[in-house]
Image (tube, helix red, strand yellow):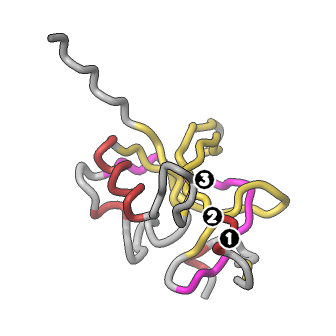
Amino acid sequence: MMPQPALAARHVFVYGTLRAGGSNDIARYHPRPQRVGDGVIAGTLYDLGAYPGAVLGGEGSIRGEVYRITPEVEAALDLLEGVAADGSGEYLKRELDVMVGPQGVMCLVYEIHPGRIEGRTAIDSGDWLARG
């Protein structure tokens, strides 16, 4: 039997409680994610109470951080974000190019399910940690 190839590490863009200092700080996961830098994506950030939800695209911008993660951490994040294979979960997992300094990095981004933002307030600054 041939050995299975190791799954490659990926990058994730985090914009809410997973950011450094947030209530779900991504640094608590193991193996510890490696911070790549700060990034900005096009979208609108919504206040869902204890955490935010991003809707991708449009005129607004969302501030966040980019981390290199292992498949084990990705699986844990999928669980935290309530991702469902059929698209019915709380968040939908997307991939997009995020500018980190002068270069683009392909990242996973967890987008809130559209049905979850009805009646919610947009965070005009696009920055969950500076909303206060």
Foreground mark, 3 or 1, reads 1
Q: Which residue is mark 2?
A: 113
Q: What is the distance, in whole Å, between disc 2 and disc 3 at their CAs?
A: 22 Å
Q: Which residue is mark 1?
A: 115
* N-term mark: 3 or 1: 3
Coordinates of residue 12 in the picture (x, y in percent): 48, 49
Q: Which residues are magenta?
A: 33-49
Q: Which residue is mark 3?
A: 39
Foreground mark, 2 or 3, reads 2
Amino acid type of the residue that numbered disc 2 sits on in the rendered structure: His
Asked where in the image residue 112 lies, by quadrant, the reply is bottom right
Residue beneath the point at 24% across and 20% down: 4
The outermost residue toward the left is 1
| SS at badge 1 | helix
Q: Is residue 22 above or below residue 57?
A: below
Residue beneath the point at 46% across and 72% down: 17
Q: What is the distance, in whole Å, between disc 1 and disc 2 at their CAs?
A: 5 Å
Coordinates of residue 60 in the picture (x, y in percent): 79, 63
Does the CB distance between marks 3 and 1 fall below 8 Å?
no
Asked where in the image residue 24 lies, by quadrant, the reply is bottom left
Amino acid type of the residue that numbered disc 1 sits on in the rendered structure: Gly
Q: Quadrant of the N terminus?
A: top left
Coordinates of residue 108 in the picture (x, y in percent): 53, 46
Tell me, yes or no, whether the highlighted magenta stretch contains residue 77.
Answer: no
Q: Is residue 127 above or below residue 4?
A: below
Q: What is the distance, in whole Å, between disc 3 and disc 1 at their CAs?
A: 26 Å
Within-10-Å neighbours for mark 3: few <14, some 14–19, many 20+: some
Amino acid type of the residue that numbered disc 3 sits on in the rendered structure: Gly
Does the CB distance between marks 1 and 2 fall below 8 Å?
yes
| SS at badge 2 | loop
